Amino acid sequence: MAWALTPLTEEQREVQRVAREFAEREIAPFADQWDREQHFEPSIVAKLGELGFLGMLLPEQYDGLGLDMLTYLVALEEIATVDASIAVMMSVHNSLPTQMILRWGTDAQKERFLRPMARGDLLGAFALSEPDAGSDAASLRAQAVRDGECWVLNGTKAWVSSGPAAGVIVAMARTDSPGDRRGARGISAFILTPDLPGFHVGKKEDKMGLRASPTVQLVFDNLRVPAGNLLGGEGSGFIYAMQSLDNGRLGIAAQAIGIAEAALRNASRYAGERRQFGKPIKEYQAIQFKLADIATRVSAGRALLHAAATAKDRGEHVTQFSAMAKLFASETAMAATQEAIQIFGGYGYVKDYPVERLFRDAKVTEIYEGTSEIQRIVIARELYSRGGN
Ligand code: CAA
């Protein structure tokens, strides 16, 4: 199959093997059924927690595996190759709420949340978007008002992956006042739990793909949050969200590469089995060229992703690199799944083979955690901010 151009260490190969075997054994037999029934399987959260895969980037002090970004992404790709719905749950949890609490949380917040999150007892979610604030995330309107020892939140968050199953949600809300709007600097981050009074799970989305990953609105109706649940500095929530999405986008890129790799494997296997005009269709150059193009794009996408992850592991600023990796990987997932369906012909258009699900799952990687258009904006802005252009 497509090559990993970055040589993996023995430890990384071992984590990859564990992830692959877990995905094949625990997820693959059910992936189509969960997709069909829009079923979120909570036992997978517990099993991923037992494996340590929900604390991959957390230090051992908090029961995490203390792994680097590249190793985490290698495991995530393996999960995505089998089921992109499980992969997004794993990606959001590891990349966003756990990292935000680790980086900006108080000791008390870390003590309370990180160990149960690493063990899979508390699943994490991230709530930034709203019905009227998607690409323009800084225009969000959920409002938090201080009331004694609490903050009172009102508003609706949208497109929250894992929302109804989450035990911890890092949510962004405005803490500036209507008479003194401060734009991106008027937004703060809060750690929410579903038991707080005024917390409601709203509309569940009926999605094209990732149907085994529940996506919901969250409604805050005079939601009372203890003041101790403010995450980091007041007014810094948008910056935290953006910095965290630099990590999150690497996770989505790994998910997209996993989907594309699955399309390649399915299409090349099918091309060897399917016979037309007296020979297997893999013997026709038209099919060979399609497979060659998919394989090339998958390898290029993986190489870019691994380079970005390695830069992150060296402590470099990866805003531009992660946007590039996500942009390229998600467009690769779309192209690969589309061509895989073409190779399958009519059999690709029905649910008997996984490529139909892969195609539906691929599309969202060009949309969430920043659309492809937003990635291009981020990449272009970074060209100028580095000077000389
Ligand atoms: N790292 C650090 N700081 C950053 C940053 C980054 N990557 N990006 C922006 N900032 C800072 C800026 O420096 C600026 O700080 P100052 O106040 O000090 O100047 C501040 O944040 C505001 O930045 P901008 O002026 O650039 O903000 P903007 O309003 O122009 O928006 C944007 C920039 C890149 C378009 C941003 O809004 C964006 O990324 N939009 C897409 C939102 C997104 O990805 N949403 C995904 C939601 S999660 C999800 O998909 C669901 C899921 O569960 C999977």
Image (cartoon, helix red, strand yellow):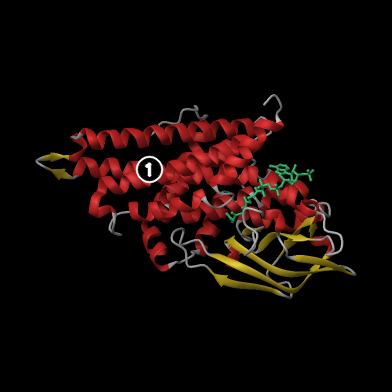
Q: Residues within 10 Å of mark 1 (few under 14, many from 20)?
A: many
Residue 382 position by quadrant: top right
In the displayed image of the protein, which residue is found farthest to the right?
148
Which of the two residues, 110 or 131, is positioned nearer the viewer here?
A: 131
Question: Which residue in the structure is indicated by mark 1?
Answer: 336
**Residue 20 seen in render:** no
Q: Is residue 317 left or right of residue 308?
A: right
Q: Residue 150 appears at what percent x and percent y?
A: 84, 68
In the displayed image of the protein, which residue is found farthest to the left?
278
Q: Secondary structure at mark 1?
A: helix
Q: Residue 346 appears at what percent x and percent y?
A: 23, 54
For the point 56% across and 45% down, the residue is 373
Which of the two residues, 312 or 119, is positioned nearer the viewer here?
A: 312
For the point 64% across and 68% down, the residue is 218
245 over 130 or under it: above or below: above
For the point 77% across and 48% down, the residue is 104
Q: Residue 237 appears at what percent x and percent y?
A: 76, 53
Q: Residue 13 appears at what percent x and percent y?
A: 48, 34
Where's the N terminus, which quadrant? top left
266 over 168 or under it: above or below: above
